[in-house]
Image (cartoon, rainbow, N blue to C red):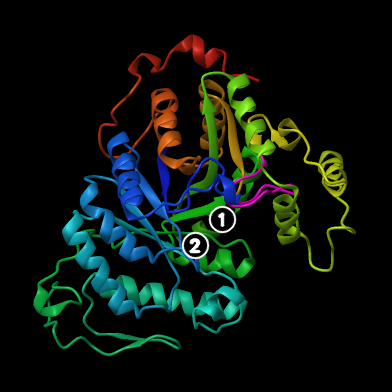
Amino acid sequence: MAVKLLWYLTLPDGPVPWEPEGRWNTGFDHLRQLAATIDRLGYYGALIATGFGHNEILTVASATLSATQRIKFLAAIHPGLLTPAKLAQIALTFDNFSGGRLALNAINGNDATSAAFGVHYGHDERYDFSLEYWQAFKESYLGQKNGYDGKYIKLAPNPNLSNGSRRGVAGGGGLQPVQTNGVPLWGAGTSPAGVAHSVRILDTYLSFADTPERLGAKFRNVAAEAAKIGRTLTFGTRLQIIVRETEGEAWEYAQWLVDRTSVEYAIESIKRQLPQGETFESYRSDNPQVQKNLETIRAGRLPKAKDYEIYPNIWTGPALHGFNVLAPLAGTTLVGSAENIAARIREFEAQGTSAFILSGWPLIDEAHRVAELLFPLLDIDHGFEVPLLNPERRHLPDRRERAVR
């Protein structure tokens, strides 16, 4: 099984963007340069982040489209902010302009985030609404003319579509669905309601990273649920990455990041991970290393970089998406030599992971490092020939044999 490697397309950037002094003042020119770099280096696609504090997703995708030729734009979308028919019209337009390069990351969010956007449903009901939304979106994209009559979503028949027409929701615009099976949907959902929702609508199921075995077990459970309704999914994960020529260089850089991270950032991140009813002062971990790290942070110091390693080359140190001291989550990072990182990716691959959404800081610099050092060591399936910046590294047996800790 070959893998797909995606990068991260977002404005927050810099060598240590989670700290004010390490964050650059970026703008549209930087975003366009980043999109062009991701495309030129041969990544499969780019994830565009969503939520308050981020630029609007579909605007970013449209504004940077002309800087690219082949990457997929994985746009994170909260259902309900646009009607499914309007989103389908936008998707049809984007696909016709790009040659079918749109994919959507179906975000269900949480109660507070959804309410802030004006969507007011409880946890399980939010999934029921989302199911109808994405069903209606897909039917609209594919030119279904009879409308949709659900509990939450009601679309009248489209008067611009005659029997047998495949002109799409734009009617007189003559838009044809470019992707014959519809726009691919990526997404996540860990609760029972989330899994039941995911297996019905998603094409690629996503999860934050963990150890390969634990992530593989999660994916196998989801695959089993999908099989019960006759569906097969692919699986992907989200990781930060620090890849260098040697282990020593990679861990030296990880320590450099720790040294520039404040104790306050660690404490804020820990508080977001605490179980309900626990406080930063009261919580105790069953994991001795995590508990030791907590005690060091409570004393006003950050542990050394290596103290956050939970598995060979898998790190829960500081990142833009959190400092996951208690357990792996959005900030989980691959750290190591190219050979060892390739070995870890192959472990994930053996456990069912075929797509990896990566990011490193600064984004353009680290995108180059990954393409140069890691691409030649992996079996990559991006649907086009991936340019190799360092082709002499490709499939060197002695390097693979040394890909151990």
Q: Residue at x 39, y 25 (%)?
A: 372
Magenta region, main secondary structure: loop
CB-based contact (under 8 Å), mark 1 and mark 2: yes
Name the residue at 50% across, 40% down.
Answer: 361
Helix, strand, or loop for circle 2?
helix
**Image coordinates for residue 6, horizontal then vertical, percent:** 41, 44
Residue 327: x percent and y percent?
Answer: 72, 48
The crowding category of the residue bearing disc 2, from other C-alpha atoms within 10 Å (few below 14, some 14 to 19, many at least 20), is many
Q: Image height check: is 109 above or below 353?
A: below
CA distance for labels 1 and 2: 7 Å
Left/right placement of residue 164 relative to residue 35 reads left
Question: Which circle marks residue 199 in the picture?
Answer: 2
Nearer to us in this view, 304 or 133: 304
Find the magenta span and give its range: 315-330
53 left or right, relative to 314: left
* Quarter in which the N terminus is drawn: top left
Helix, strand or loop status at disc 1: helix
Would you say 83 lies left or right of 193 here? left
Whether 321 is among the magenta residues is yes
Q: Amino acid at mark 1?
A: Val
Residue 314 in magenta stretch: no
Q: Position of residue 325 (x, y in %)?
A: 74, 47
- Few, some or many residues within 10 Å of mark 1 (<14, 14–19, 20+): many
Within the image, what quadrant is residue 387 found in?
top left
Can see residue 177?
Answer: yes
Q: Which residue is mark 1?
A: 222
What's the residue type where badge 2 is placed? Val
Q: Nearer the viewer, residue 397 or 54?
A: 54
